[in-house]
Amino acid sequence: MGHQAFAHAGLAELVPGIIHRIRDAIRAPYHLGDRVVRVDVSIGSAECVPGATVQQLLQEADISMYRAKAAGKNAAARPAA
């Protein structure tokens, strides 16, 4: 499965909870016939600051996602401070 970068626009205090709910929803068990499978996900977020372009926002989210992947399975990362 390819990667998806999820970008949010502000409301930084809500992001960890939103990411947690997204991760839980994706990791819910899927029943495929007689098998049960789970999907791991790496999530990176970005903060939309005034003047930022869409390209910059997506690039920051992508960098955060790769930091999450480096942290291990089922991880999330926010932009570096």
Image: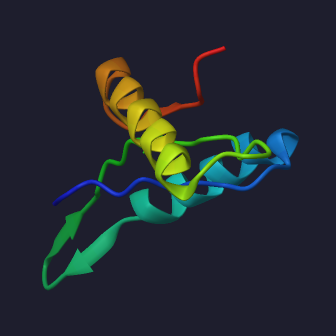
Q: Quadrant of the N terminus?
A: bottom left
Q: Where on the picture, by quarter, is residue 45?
A: top right
Which residue is drawn at the image coordinates 86% and 39% (left, top)?
Answer: 13
Which residue is drawn at the image coordinates 55% and 57% (left, top)?
Answer: 54
Q: Where on the picture, by quarter, is residue 47?
A: top right
The foreground one among 3 and 36 is 3
Q: Is residue 72 above or below residue 22?
A: above
The foreground one among 54 and 23 is 54
The foreground one among 31 and 61 is 61
Circle count: 0
Q: Is residue 29 above or below residue 44?
A: below
Image coordinates for residue 7, horizontal then vertical, percent: 57, 54
Left or right: where does residue 72 sit relative to residue 19?
left
Q: Quadrant of the C terminus?
A: top right
Which residue is drawn at the image coordinates 32% and 24% (left, top)?
Answer: 72
The residue at the far top in this view is: 81
Q: Where on the picture, by quarter, is residue 28?
A: bottom left
Left or right: where does residue 5 sit relative to residue 18?
left
Color scheme of the displayed model: rainbow
Image coordinates for residue 49, horizontal then vertical, percent: 76, 42
The foreground one among 14 and 62 is 62
Left or right: where does residue 40 sit relative to residue 44?
left
The residue at the far front in this view is: 51
